[in-house]
Image (tube, rainbow, N blue to C red):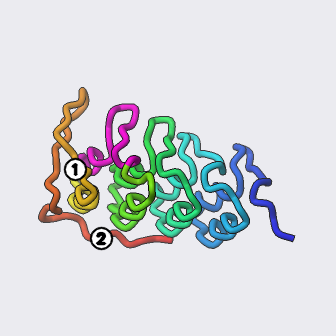
Amino acid sequence: ARADPKIGCDSEGRLPLFEAVQWGHTEAVTALLAARADANFAGADSAGRGPLSVAVRANFTNVAEALLAAGADEQSQDRLGRNAVHHCVQPLDYGSFENVTLLAAILRTPAGRAAASAADEAGVTPPMLAAMQGSGRLAAVLAKEGLAATLVETPSRQMLALAAEPFAGSRPEVEVHS
């Protein structure tokens, strides 16, 4: 008998798929998806991020790609209105993964371009986040899709536009983690 991927919630009501995603267990994620776990309804973290955004934020490329192949919603928003593309390009306190492979994979999905154009609750789009962190590599991937950042004035900061080409001194390609 096969295990049912829709039972066995943790104390927060999250299904086994969410836990496997959170820990980056590619094999467990793949097995649960093969057993018909729903890539979109496995639970969320305390910020309202679903499995795809959690995988993207943790730089679990293989897990994120498995979720995308299973139909994960790249436009699903957390409590701040951010989706998987926002999480892929956002600057983090400790730097950025600059995972152009994962960004390109999300953009290739049916709703990837729409997710990359979406503004969060503060009016910030993924291209603006790429510009904010000065990532020529991420900006180049977005610009290739016609999603370039523009000059935007916000109460807290001015975000500069990036050229479509990566700038000199751009960080090296990120190592992909599974």
Label 2 residue SS? loop
Identify the residue at horizontal 45%, vertical 56% (top origin).
Answer: 110
Residue that badge 2 annotates: 173
Instruction: Single out the mark in the foreground, 1 or 2.
Output: 1
Residue 125, picture quadrant: top left
- Give x and y (percent) for residue 21: 59, 60
Specify whether 111 is left or right of 91: right
Determine the residue located farthest toward the front in the rendered image: 110
Let me know if residue 92 appears in the view: no
**Residue 122 shown in magenta:** yes
User: Is the residue marked by circle 2 packed among few (<14), some (14-19), or many (20+) residues within 10 Å?
Assistant: few
**51 drawn magenta:** no
Q: Which residue is mark 1?
A: 148
Q: Are marks 1 and 2 in contact (CB under 8 Å)?
A: no
86, above or below 103, in the image: above
Q: Does residue 11 appear to the left or right of 129 in the view shown?
A: right
Quarter of the rendering occupied by the N terminus: bottom right
